[in-house]
Image (cartoon, grey):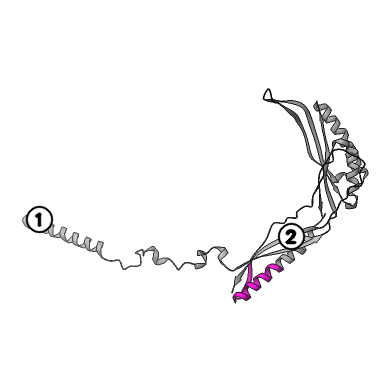
């Protein structure tokens, strides 16, 4: 019996020894996972830098000038009365005369568009009672008229002022070119050439080889309007209104990025 127990004890010790050896032995087969870093390749250095730190960045600008061939005239009437009905009636009658005058002067129906119409109370502050009260109503009716013959603008302004009488309001006048597509095309070509010239100069001065453009972006197009302000609240016998159209500037900007070879 003692012999049997001794044999069992030897078997247990042998099994424990074999298991411990298996757990501590370094793995040499291909199924063992290597550290993650062993599989990482060298990073692409270019990713570490922002796009604006790569290549040659330049901005070009192109401008052209042209004489406008269209006038945009903002005009209308403004009437005040103690009641809405009366104010609206006075404004409607005056505006009908203004519209009729525009048509008689050759302005097409499609070139007259309502810009603003409002009915607002007119208030007066009562100091002793610390409050305001409504003393009347104001009706405003404004249209934008496109005049395709600039030389007639002054004459039309005078005729509108006479038609609307004391209720006439002429807010502003601006000039435009009806179809500026070709002008912007010319300005764009100048802007691109300007940007290319700058990039070539930078490459020459810094002694680097200029590569191909890898990015081209056009900037915002904006043509500042030429505006003259008028406040015609009464018509009197005056000399014809002079209108000077001048020239308009059409500007395009571009941004280009070149590779450095």
Q: Quadrant of the N terminus?
A: bottom left
Locate residue 221: give its quadrant: bottom right
Q: Quadrant of the C terminus?
A: bottom right
Q: Residue at x 74, y 60 (%)?
A: 251
Q: Give the magenta range.
A: 193-217
- Which residue is identified by label 1? 5
Q: Is residue 85 above or below residue 48?
A: above
Pick whichever, 75 or 181, lies toward us. 75
Is residue 182 visible from the viewing direction of this image? no
In front: label 2 or label 1: 2
Picture disc at residue 81: none
| Circle on res. 251 | 2
Q: Is residue 20 left or right of 144 when viewed as pictured?
A: left
- Local secondary structure at mark 2: strand
| Residue that appears at 78% across and 29% down | 137
Outermost residue, left direction?
2
**Residue closest to the eye, 257 or 94:** 94
Above or below, 260 against 65 in this view is below
Q: Residue at x 77, y 34 (%)?
A: 118
Q: Which residue lies at the image location 15% right of the left edge and 59% below the top edge?
A: 13
The residues tagged by marks 2 and 1 sit, at their Cα atoms, a distance apart of: 104 Å
Q: Is residue 108 left or right of residue 127?
A: right
Q: Given the current orientation, which residue lies at the most extreme top position?
A: 129
- Percent x, y for residue 114? 81, 40
Q: Residue 215 vs residue 146: left or right?
A: left
Dot placed on the residue nearer the N-terminal end, 2 or 1: 1
Residue farthest toward the front in the current orientation of the protein: 128
Foreground residue among 130 and 164: 130
- Give residue 216's position: percent from left, percent from top: 66, 64
- Dot 1 falls on a residue whose secondary structure is helix
206 magenta-colored: yes
Question: Which one is nearer the viewer's eye here, 221 or 154?
Answer: 154
């Amino acid at each position: 019996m003692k012999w049997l127990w001794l044999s069992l004890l030897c078997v247990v010790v042998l099994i424990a020894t074999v298991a411990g050896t298996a757990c501590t032995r370094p793995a040499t087969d291909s199924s063992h996972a290597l550290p993650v870093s062993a599989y990482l390749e060298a990073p692409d250095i270019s990713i570490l830098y922002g796009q604006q730190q790569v290549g040659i960045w330049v901005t070009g600008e192109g401008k052209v000038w042209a004489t406008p061939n269209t006038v945009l005239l903002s005009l209308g009437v403004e009437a005040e009365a103690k009641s809405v009905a009366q104010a609206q009636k006075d404004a409607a009658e005056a505006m009908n005369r203004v519209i009729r005058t525009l048509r008689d002067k050759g302005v097409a129906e499609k070139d007259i568009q309502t810009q603003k119409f409002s009915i607002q109370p007119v208030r007066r502050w009562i100091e002793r009672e610390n409050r305001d009260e409504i003393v009347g109503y104001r009706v405003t009716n404004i249209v934008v008229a496109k005049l395709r013959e600039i030389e007639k603008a002054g004459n039309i302004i005078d005729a509108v002022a006479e038609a609307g009488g004391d209720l006439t309001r002429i807010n502003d006048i601006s000039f435009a070119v009806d179809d500026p597509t070709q002008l912007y095309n010319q300005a764009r070509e100048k802007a691109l050439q300007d940007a290319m010239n700058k990039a070539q100069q930078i490459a020459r001065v810094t002694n680097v080889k200029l590569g191909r453009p890898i990015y081209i972006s056009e900037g915002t197009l904006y043509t500042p309007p030429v505006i003259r302000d008028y406040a015609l609240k009464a018509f009197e016998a005056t000399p014809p209104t002079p209108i000077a159209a001048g020239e308009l500037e059409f500007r395009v900007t571009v941004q280009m990025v070149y590779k450095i070879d």
